[in-house]
Image (cartoon, grey):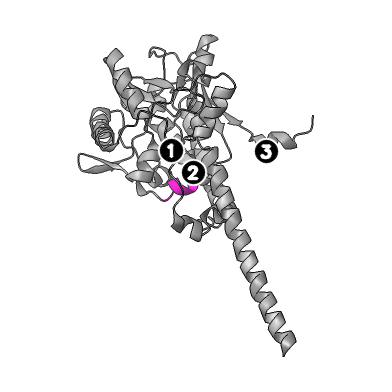
């Protein structure tokens, strides 16, 4: 009898210790995530330690200060994925529209990852291009944050470097874009740009982005109907007006801070549900059918190839390796 009681107590103690260790690990992961997040004061302290200038103003404060020195419209950056995640779509003439670019002839302020707030100029079509529009483009660049050059100075991104080297390039990239949005963008704008080459930059997270894009009925039409178009160019003025209303409202609702604010602490509910651990184990969202997603990706690439042929362009597919993949590479 005594042995059974001892065994029972031992099991209870072991169970308690196991639960404690799991939650301790969850809290530790959250601490690390907060410490090294983009909005972490720890990053400012590291910059100070190494003599790197770091702008501690909030994005809204930075924009308010910038408005004193320019007549151009200035907004926090906005992209198709941001619209999809937060609003699903916008309405133009009673129809649901997925914008494929920012507000035309405006400035976008990206995120402060390197100690400064990058300012991007969006051309007449709302894409991040510094050079003047013309009808003789060598390259059409399409991609996500890598193609856009997210959080680096605009003059340092891929398209600007190509232009500096004498290669006339037009950039259609936007942070968060997946394969379906990229295909839709080429379809809407390719004919007016008429490039000699289409360079598609691919990164490993594009497959998960595609999984999200396929859930949206408007984007799905690009895949299901070869003749589908949102008439983005024709509706651009109205699209811009809708984006202005969204951003103006967000701007008004945002409480500006004069200091660089740390990331909001993780909620107790998130910790109790072991969100961080489950996320790393791939258990947060239902696992997509990868084979089906890749099959759809192949279909999009074939459609893009056909589109490039119709445009008399050559399609070049560029795979951008992750840091982990580079570490595994033997030289």
**Residue holding disc 3:** 324
Q: How many marks?
A: 3
Q: Which residue: 38% across, 34% down?
A: 79
Does the residue at mark 3 contact the one at mark 1 (Cβ under 8 Å)?
no
The x, y position of residue 221, in whole percent, is: 38, 45
Q: Which residue: 71% across, 80% down?
A: 7
| Mark in the foreground, 3 or 1 | 3
Q: Quadrant of the N terminus?
A: bottom right
Chief secondary structure of the magenta portion = helix
**Callout 1: SS:** helix
Q: Which label was assigned to residue 290?
A: none
Residue 62: name its quadrant: top left
| Mark in the foreground, 3 or 2 | 3
Residue 8: name its quadrant: bottom right
Give yes or no for residue 120 being in the magenta stretch: no
Q: Is residue 175 above or below residue 31?
A: above
The mark that comes first in sequence, 3 or 1, is 1
Question: Which span is picked out in magenta?
Answer: 211-215
Between the residue at mark 3 and the residue at mark 2, the CA separation in whole angstroms equals 20 Å
Question: Which is nearer the eye, 112 or 56?
Answer: 56
Question: Which is nearer the eye, 267 or 200?
Answer: 267
Q: Which residue reaches farthest bottom?
A: 1
**Residue holding disc 1:** 181
Q: Quadrant of the C terminus?
A: top right
Q: Residue 104, can we see it?
A: no
Q: Residue 87, can we see it?
A: yes
| Mark in the foreground, 1 or 2 | 2
**Residue holding disc 2:** 209
Between the residue at mark 3 and the residue at mark 1, the CA separation in whole angstroms equals 26 Å
The mark that comes first in sequence, 1 or 2, is 1
Does the residue at mark 1 contact the one at mark 2 (Cβ under 8 Å)?
yes
The mark that comes first in sequence, 3 or 2, is 2
């Amino acid at each position: 009898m005594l042995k059974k009681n001892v065994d029972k107590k031992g099991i209870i103690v072991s169970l308690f210790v196991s639960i404690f260790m799991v939650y301790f690990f969850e809290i530790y992961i959250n601490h690390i995530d907060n410490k090294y997040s983009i909005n972490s004061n720890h990053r400012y302290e590291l910059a100070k330690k190494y003599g790197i200038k770091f702008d501690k103003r909030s994005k809204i404060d930075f924009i308010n200060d910038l408005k004193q020195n320019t007549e151009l419209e200035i907004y926090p950056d906005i992209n198709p994925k941001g619209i999809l995640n937060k609003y699903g779509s916008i309405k133009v003439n009673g129809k649901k529209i997925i914008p494929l670019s920012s507000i035309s002839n405006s400035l976008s302020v990206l995120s402060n990852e390197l100690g400064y707030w990058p300012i991007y100029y969006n051309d007449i079509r709302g894409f991040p291009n510094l050079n003047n529009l013309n009808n003789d483009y060598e390259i059409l660049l399409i991609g996500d944050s890598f193609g856009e050059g997210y959080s680096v100075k605009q003059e340092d991104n891929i398209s600007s470097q190509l232009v500096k080297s004498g290669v006339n390039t037009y950039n259609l990239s936007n942070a968060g874009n997946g394969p379906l949005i990229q295909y839709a963008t080429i379809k809407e704008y390719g004919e007016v740009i008429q490039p000699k080459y289409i360079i598609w930059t691919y990164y490993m997270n594009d497959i998960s982005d595609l999984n999200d894009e396929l859930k949206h009925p408007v984007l799905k039409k690009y895949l299901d109907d070869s003749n589908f178009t949102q008439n983005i160019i024709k509706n651009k003025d109205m699209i811009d007006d809708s984006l202005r209303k969204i951003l103006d409202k967000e701007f008004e609702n945002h409480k500006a801070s004069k200091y660089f604010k740390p990331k909001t602490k993780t909620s107790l509910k998130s910790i109790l549900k072991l969100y961080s651990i489950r996320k790393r184990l791939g258990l947060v969202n239902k696992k997509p059918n990868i084979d089906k997603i890749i099959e759809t990706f192949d279909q999009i690439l074939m459609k893009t190839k056909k589109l490039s042929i119709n445009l008399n362009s050559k399609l070049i597919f560029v795979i951008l390796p992750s840091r982990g993949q580079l570490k595994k590479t033997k030289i």
